[in-house]
Amino acid sequence: MEKIDLKTYWDKVYIKKDVEELGWYEENPEQSLQLIEKCLLENNAHILNVGTGASTLIDRLLGLGYNNVTATDISSTSMEKLKSRLGDEQSKKVQWIVDNLAQPVELLNIDNVDLWHDRAVLHFLTSESDQNTYFNLLKNTVKPKGYVIIASFNMDGAISCSGLPVFRHDVGSLSSKLGDEFTLLNNFDYTYTMPSGDTRAYVYALYRRK
Ligand SMILES: C[S@@+](CC[C@H](N)C(=O)[O-])C[C@H]1O[C@@H](n2cnc3c(N)ncnc32)[C@H](O)[C@@H]1O
């Protein structure tokens, strides 16, 4: 595949469609919330949501009273859409970072994170080197006793998304990338129904750092 400018690519994805039409839109991010509930986090826990896009998870976290949320994505357009949905007052409660998880710059300054949450971004990192960068970042960022939630296309999932190839995962591949320092607390497969009616098979996994 020809080298593409990923930021421009994803900005265009978000310019072309309304958020509710996107193939990963969730009105209610129920599976993520179910796992977040298990973490029993304080309201001021630092939650880092990677590959946020325009996800309704941010609205829901603020609604639940979490006041230390960082949203990051390669696409500034996606997060502008999210900010405009939230409105000024709510947006100001969130820390916003535009960065590439495969070539992080600003994200390297983040540490002491209580929860790393990723729905549907890891699977876009298809090379071993990009995946290693992602997991090294995660390990530099999440504090001891902190939590990690990853939701990725599973082995029955699609081989591409939004015109890009994906690398599918299962609990075994996630656990092996995280290593012995992270204990698997919960995992399940989930079939997501897209706005088009098509389905996508996901694996959800919750880990805790020792
Ligand atoms: C399928 S969407 C999922 C968005 C959101 N997590 C959700 O559940 O609605 C994938 C998101 O990952 C972002 N993304 C893709 N590659 C990325 C990268 N290398 N670094 C950071 N974000 C990336 C895209 O801009 C997009 O918002």
Image (tube, rainbow, N blue to C red):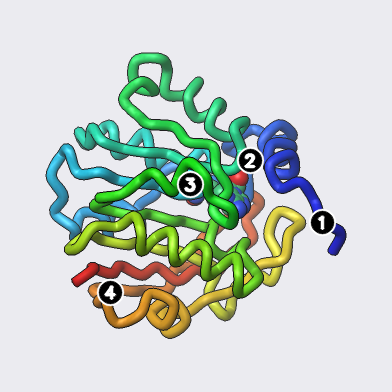
> Relative to residue 20, is residue 132 depicted above or below?
below
Please rate how many residues cluster around mark 3, counting C-alpha atoms within 10 Å: few if below 14, some from 14 to 19, many from 20.
Answer: some
Q: CA distance from mark 3 to mark 1?
A: 30 Å
Of the numbered discs in the image, which one, if any, rests on residue 26? 3
Mark closest to the chain's N terminus, 1 or 2:
1
From the image, tell me which residue sits under label 2.
Answer: 21
| In this rendering, position of residue 182 left or right of residue 164 | left
Mark closest to the chain's N terminus, 2 or 3:
2
Q: CA distance from mark 4 to mark 3?
A: 28 Å
Secondary element under disc 1, as helix, strand or loop, is loop
The C terminus sits in image quarter: bottom left
Mark closest to the chain's N terminus, 4 or 2:
2
Q: CA distance from mark 4 to mark 2?
A: 36 Å
* Depth check, front residue: 190 or 73: 73
Give residue 200's position: percent from left, percent from top: 58, 65
From the image, tell me which residue sits under label 1.
Answer: 3
> Relative to residue 106, is residue 15 depicted above or below?
above
